[in-house]
Image (cartoon, helix red, strand yellow):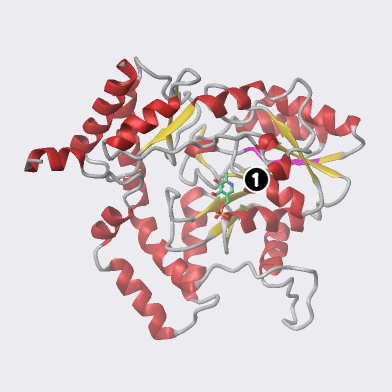
C-alpha cells in the first residue's frame, strides 16, 4: 500500500476527543492541578463557579451541577415527588434514561411518538398519551420532551399541552445544551426544569460522568440541592428527605469550566460540519431539517435511508475506516425493560420507522473539511451502488 492509500483509508474517529484535548492545550491539565492543590474534591469552589457560569450561559436562574444526566432528570422527579400512580409522558425514540428515571421513581412512563422531520416529541401524540394515561387510571403529572441529537423540541406546543392538563415540563436536554428555541437557550426557556448531561460524547462534556439541572424556582432549586446530597437539611446530619449521592466531582467541574470557554466556538464549528453534510448528501439521503425556530448543537448527525439500506452503508464505510452508529435501533417500547409501558393511542409508527432508517455519521467540532469530504464521498459511493 502506498503512503497515499494509507492516508486515504486511515480510521476516522466518530468523535475526536483527542483533537479537542490538543486545542485546550495545558488549560485542562492546569485546572485539574489546581484541584489537586486545594484538595476540595467534593463541592469545591469550581463547582459553584461552574454553576454560576452555566446559569449565565443559558439564562437560567439556577444551575445545579450533579453526577450525570440521568441523575439530573431523577433529582427533579424526586423533588416533584412523582411516584406510583403517576404517569410521565416520554417520547419512545430516545435514550432509555429518559424513561428509566420515571420507572425508578415508581411512576409509569407513557410513551408517545415523535415527528419524522425533527425526531422530537410529536405534540399530537403527547396529547394522545395523556388520554391513554387517564384511561388507565393514571395521573399525568409531567412530560419529558427530549431535544434529540441536539435539536430543540417544539417547546411552546408541549408547554401548552402541559398547561392544559396541569403537567410539569422536564426538558431532557442531555444531548442539546447550547441549542436554542425561538432565540433562547435550552435551560433558560422557563420550563419547570431542564436537565443536561456532560458524558464525554455530549457537545459540552467532561472526562467522566456529570450533568446539571436548570431551574427558575428558588424553592425547587433548594429541594434539588438537598436531594443531591442525601436530602440534607439545615443540619447536615438531620436528613430532611430521602436523597441520593448526586454531586458533580470538583475535578469534573474544573474541566468543564475550561471547556465552556471554547463551547460557543465549537457550536459554530459543528454547525459548519452539519451544513457541509447537508450540502454533500441532501440529494441522496434524508438529512436533518432544522426549522426556523430551533437550532441544534449536533450531538449526532443522523440521516435517514430507505429501510434495508443502512447495514450495507455501515459495512461499506467501516471497510474504509469510517465509523457509524445507529441511535436508536430499538425505540423504548421494543426494549425488554420498557416493553410493557403504555403507548399513546394511535401507536408509535414514526418511532418504529425511524428505528429502521436512521444512521449517524462522525460529528464533532474538529472534523476537517478534507476528512469530511472523504466521508461524504464514501457515503455517496456506497449509496450509488
Ligand atoms: C436523551 C438522554 N437522556 C438522558 C441521558 C443520560 O445522561 P447520562 O449518561 O449523563 O446519565 C442521555 C445520555 O446518554 C441522553 O442521551
Q: Residue at x 29, y 67 (%)?
A: 27
Instruction: Look at mark 1 in the image and give the residue it sits on.
Output: 98
Residue 144 part of the magenta-drawn span: yes
Residue 147: horizontal and vertical position, in percent?
A: 55, 38
Split into 4 quadrants, where in the image is the N terminus?
top left
Q: Is residue 238 left or right of residue 169?
A: right
Q: Is residue 38 left or right of residue 153?
A: left
Query: Badge 1: how crowded within 10 Å, few (<14), some, or many (20+)?
Result: many
Q: Is residue 14 visible?
A: yes
Split into 4 quadrants, where in the image is the C terminus?
top left
Q: Residue at x 69, y 58 (%)?
A: 75
Residue 353: horizontal and vertical position, in percent?
A: 58, 22
Q: Hey, which quadrant is residue 243 in on the image?
A: bottom right
Could you say whether the residue bearing mark 1 is in a helix, strand or loop?
helix
Q: Residue at x 56, y 22 (%)?
A: 116
Residue 90: horizontal and vertical position, in percent?
A: 69, 38
Instruction: Look at the image and give the residue range highlighted in magenta.
Output: 141-145
Amino acid at each position: 500500500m502506498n503512503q497515499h492509500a494509507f492516508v486515504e483509508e486511515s480510521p476516522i474517529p466518530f468523535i475526536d476527543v483527542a483533537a479537542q484535548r490538543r486545542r485546550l492545550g495545558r488549560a485542562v491539565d492546569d485546572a485539574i492541578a489546581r484541584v489537586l492543590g486545594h484538595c476540595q474534591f467534593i463541592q469545591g469552589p469550581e463547582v459553584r463557579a461552574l454553576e454560576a457560569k452555566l446559569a449565565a450561559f443559558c439564562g437560567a436562574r439556577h444551575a445545579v451541577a450533579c453526577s450525570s444526566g440521568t441523575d439530573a432528570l431523577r433529582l427533579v422527579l424526586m423533588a416533584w415527588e412523582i411516584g406510583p400512580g403517576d404517569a410521565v409522558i416520554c417520547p419512545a425514540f430516545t435514550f432509555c434514561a429518559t424513561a428509566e428515571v420515571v420507572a425508578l421513581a415508581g411512576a409509569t412512563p407513557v410513551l408517545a411518538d415523535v415527528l419524522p422531520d425533527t425526531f422530537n416529541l410529536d405534540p399530537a401524540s403527547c396529547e394522545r398519551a395523556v388520554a391513554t394515561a387517564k384511561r388507565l387510571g393514571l395521573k399525568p403529572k409531567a412530560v419529558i420532551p427530549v431535544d434529540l441529537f441536539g435539536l430543540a423540541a417544539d417547546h411552546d406546543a408541549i408547554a401548552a399541552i402541559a398547561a392544559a392538563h396541569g403537567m410539569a415540563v422536564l426538558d431532557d436536554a442531555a444531548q442539546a445544551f447550547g441549542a436554542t428555541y425561538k432565540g433562547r437557550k435550552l435551560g433558560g426557556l422557563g420550563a419547570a426544569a431542564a436537565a443536561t448531561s456532560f458524558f464525554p460524547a455530549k457537545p459540552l462534556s467532561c472526562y467522566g460522568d456529570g450533568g446539571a439541572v436548570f431551574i427558575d424556582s428558588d424553592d425547587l432549586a433548594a429541594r434539588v440541592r438537598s436531594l443531591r446530597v442525601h436530602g440534607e437539611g439545615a443540619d447536615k446530619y438531620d436528613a430532611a428527605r430521602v436523597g441520593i449521592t448526586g454531586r458533580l466531582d470538583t475535578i469534573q467541574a474544573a474541566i468543564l469550566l475550561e471547556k465552556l470557554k471554547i463551547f460557543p466556538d465549537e457550536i459554530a464549528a459543528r454547525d459548519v460540519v452539519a451544513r457541509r453534510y447537508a450540502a454533500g448528501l441532501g440529494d441522496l439521503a434524508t438529512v436533518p431539517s432544522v426549522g426556523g425556530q430551533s437550532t441544534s448543537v449536533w450531538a449526532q448527525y443522523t440521516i435517514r435511508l430507505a429501510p434495508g439500506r443502512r447495514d450495507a452503508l455501515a459495512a461499506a464505510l467501516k471497510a474504509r475506516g469510517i465509523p457509524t452508529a445507529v441511535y436508536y435501533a430499538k425505540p423504548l417500547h421494543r426494549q425488554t425493560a420498557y416493553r410493557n409501558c403504555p403507548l399513546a393511542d394511535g401507536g408509535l409508527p414514526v418511532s418504529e420507522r425511524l428505528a429502521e432508517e436512521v444512521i449517524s455519521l462522525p460529528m464533532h467540532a474538529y472534523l476537517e473539511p478534507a476528512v469530511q469530504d472523504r466521508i461524504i464521498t464514501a457515503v455517496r459511493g456506497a449509496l450509488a451502488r
